[in-house]
Amino acid sequence: MASENLDQLTRTLAAMVADLSPANRRRAAMTIATKLRTSNAERIGKNVSPDGEKFEPRKIQKTQSNKKSLRTKAGKIKTKAAMFQKLKKLRHLTRRATSDSAIVGFVENSTARIALVSQYGQHDRIIRNSNRKVKYPVRQLLGFGPEDLNDIMDAASDLLQQLK
């Protein structure tokens, strides 16, 4: 379903921008990328995937004595804290545009590694210099939601009205 909507969106946008100059196509792509970046950042902050499902909650951390630790050192309960609080910041999400494409992704550093592991549910080290690895559940951070397709079409039509 999502791929069908995406294919339809691509065909519609291609027809809309066919007669634009490369500079105006790049401007339109940047507008779309900015819109996608903002909506993905909002979803990451809410811990919701693009299709509307909530992320699988994080597991309870265990202490060194192998007991479950529900409290931080300050005594606050930590299981309710939202995940990816820093990944949702716009400075960690990049947007690039050419006359042919709009790209939204993460800045190439540790945030990109964390996002990659979470997006595809890969194995990663818990502690930086440790050999102990854990398989993380799939939590889709970036993607198209149903409302994104409508927002993109609205932004594209508004931009085309301005350019013509």
Image (cartoon, grey):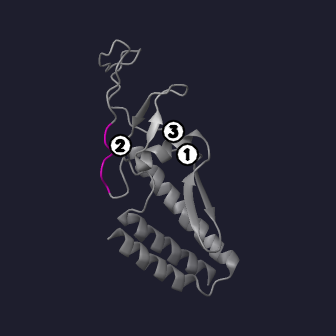
**SS type, badge 1:** helix
The residue to which callout 1 is attached is 112
Q: Amino acid at mark 2?
A: Pro
Quarter occupied by the C terminus? bottom right
- Identify the mark nearer the N-term, 3 or 2: 3
The residue to which callout 2 is attached is 137
Residue at 37% across / 47% down in the picture?
138
Q: CA distance from mark 1 to mark 2?
A: 16 Å
Report which quarter residue 23 is drawn in. Answer: bottom right
Residue at 59% across / 86% down in the picture?
18
Give the main secondary structure of the magenta stretch.
loop
Residues in magenta, as a range: 52-57
- Identify the mark nearer the N-term, 1 or 3: 3
Residue at 57% across / 66% down in the picture?
102
Quarter occupied by the N terminus? bottom left
Residue 26, percent from left and from top: 65, 72
Q: Is residue 122 above or below residue 130?
A: below
Residue 110, percent from left and from top: 57, 39
The residue to which callout 3 is attached is 86
